[in-house]
């Protein structure tokens, strides 16, 4: 007991010391921080979990809709309104086709993945409360799902979280036991946003529907869309979330697919436009950008996925080979998203490593960006059994079809140097796995 307590104190000491480095950096002016990057010879952006650069052809597709055409309100009866409405219809048809939806009426544009998930969880639960008050989710859902369930608990709903194994796969046996006649909704994401686990959604849906035919099934497919095949009919889901920026589209737009006949209650009130579940004037330029991003993602889908896999594998194997003690978080092979690399680095705190790499022109994230402001490890990594320090020392990177072999080689050169420097100033050398 004493030894375990001592190790915990030592781990906390390292986290505090490493976070002190982060705080010292952040106290410097933004101008100074940016100026420190002036001599960077190459920049490689791998923080696609938190934002993304928009390819020029997507930007060019959006620009006319800000001031030249279709800038009217799509609910208004004049030329510019009709043009705006036409663009929304086109985008709806495009997305519906890509995910195998039956009609454009099943496609609902929202401001982002977060809003789509809130609408899916809270809106569906409230609309179907008479059928039951139990919600079942996995332990590694994104924070927009996690916090939505907390909101529902405050409103009297029962929430049960299903555990996952060390690679992040949901426990289907526990899922089976959790679903009963009170269960209204199940939500399990198709691909985990942090560790890239491709969940057995089709099997999970079959289990859920067999136990309770009235249960509704939602899946956040934001990290699957454009990277693995996504077909709502084949998966059997009733609701599905998509995100624009996760496929290199503009931030500020997402989609919630709602199967025909499924009741969802609006969360906001106001002017109702073409989107019956989300009030307000639709952002046509961003919707056009999402459509263009989808078009590019699926133009050569197999080729793009193959390219991402090769880059991902080179990045993953290169880091594991060059950095002692480095451990891959999540599964390998075909059960992992083609773009995802999440690795724990012993004797390094994740935020400190992101700073070191940034100064070398390599931009990554540490665990989940949503939790980085507090001294708390990623809930995904702790759910798969990662210890305190290993979870804090994780780095998340995602590749795209636009990255090159030279980009990856540059990262593999910079990464060990950043780790070496941090390990030299780390006061503790115990294991982290």
Image (cartoon, grey):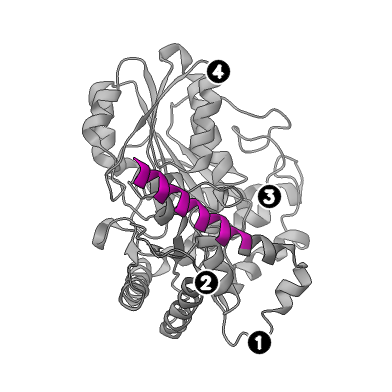
Q: Nearer the viewer, mark 1 or mark 3?
A: 1
Residue receiving disc 1: 39
Judging depth in this view, the residue of 324 and 412 nearest the camera is 324
Label 1, label 3: how far apart the Cα atoms are:
39 Å
Asked if residue 223 shows in the view, the reply is no
Q: Could you tell which of marks 1 and 2 lies nearer the N-terminus? A: 1
Q: Nearer the viewer, mark 4 or mark 1?
A: 1
Q: Residue at x 69, y 48 (%)?
A: 82
Element on which disc 3 rests: loop
Residue receiving disc 3: 283
Residue receiving disc 4: 155
Q: Which mark is residue 425?
A: 2
Label 2, label 3: how far apart the Cα atoms are:
49 Å
**Numbered range of the magenta stretch:** 1-20
Element on which disc 1 rests: loop
- Tag 2 and tag 3, C-beta contact below 8 Å: no
Judging depth in this view, the residue of 162 and 132 nearest the camera is 162
Q: Could you tell which of marks 2 and 3 lies nearer the N-terminus? A: 3
Q: Position of residue 203 (x, y in %)?
A: 23, 39
Q: Could you tell which of marks 1 and 3 lies nearer the N-terminus? A: 1
């Amino acid at each position: 007991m004493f030894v375990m307590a001592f190790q915990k104190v030592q781990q906390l000491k390292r986290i505090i010391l490493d976070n002190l480095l982060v705080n010292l950096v952040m106290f410097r002016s933004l101008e100074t921080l940016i100026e420190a990057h002036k001599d960077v010879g190459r920049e490689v952006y791998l923080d696609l979990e938190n934002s993304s650069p928009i390819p020029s052809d997507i930007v060019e597709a959006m620009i006319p809709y800000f001031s030249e055409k279709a800038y009217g309100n799509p609910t208004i009866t004049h030329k510019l309104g009709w043009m705006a409405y036409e663009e929304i219809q086109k985008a709806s048809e495009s997305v519906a086709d890509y995910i195998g939806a039956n009609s454009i009426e099943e496609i609902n544009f929202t401001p982002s993945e977060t809003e789509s998930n809130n609408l899916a969880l809270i809106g569906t639960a409230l609309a179907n409360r008479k059928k039951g008050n139990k919600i079942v989710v996995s332990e590694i859902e994104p924070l927009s799902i996690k916090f939505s369930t907390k909101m529902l608990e405050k409103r009297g709903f029962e929430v049960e979280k299903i555990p996952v194994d060390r690679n992040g796969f949901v426990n289907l046996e526990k899922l089976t036991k959790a679903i009963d006649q009170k269960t209204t909704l199940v939500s399990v994401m198709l691909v985990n946003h942090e560790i890239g686990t491709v969940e057995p959604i089709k099997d999970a849906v079959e289990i859920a529907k067999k136990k309770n035919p009235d249960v509704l099934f939602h899946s956040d497919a934001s990290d699957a869309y454009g990277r693995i095949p996504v077909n709502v009919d084949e998966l059997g889901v009733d609701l599905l979330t998509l995100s624009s920026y996760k496929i290199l589209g503009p931030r500020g737009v997402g989609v919630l697919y709602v199967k025909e006949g499924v009741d969802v209650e609006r969360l906001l009130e106001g002017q109702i436009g073409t989107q019956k579940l989300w009030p307000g004037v639709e952002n046509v330029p961003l919707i056009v950008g999402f459509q263009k991003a989808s078009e590019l993602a699926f133009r050569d889908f197999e080729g793009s996925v193959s390219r991402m896999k090769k880059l991902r594998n080179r990045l993953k194997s290169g880091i594991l080979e060059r950095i002692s003690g480095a451990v891959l978080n999540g599964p390998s092979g075909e059960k992992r998203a083609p773009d995802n690399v999440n690795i724990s680095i012993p004797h390094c705190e994740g935020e400190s490593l992101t700073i070191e790499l940034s100064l070398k022109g390599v931009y990554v994230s540490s665990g989940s960006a949503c939790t980085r402001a507090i001294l708390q490890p990623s809930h995904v990594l702790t759910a798969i059994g990662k210890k305190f320090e290993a979870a804090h020392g994780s780095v998340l990177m995602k590749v795209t079809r636009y990255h090159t072999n030279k980009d990856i080689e540059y990262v593999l050169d910079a990464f060990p140097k950043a780790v070496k420097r941090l390990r030299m100033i780390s006061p503790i050398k115990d294991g982290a796995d």
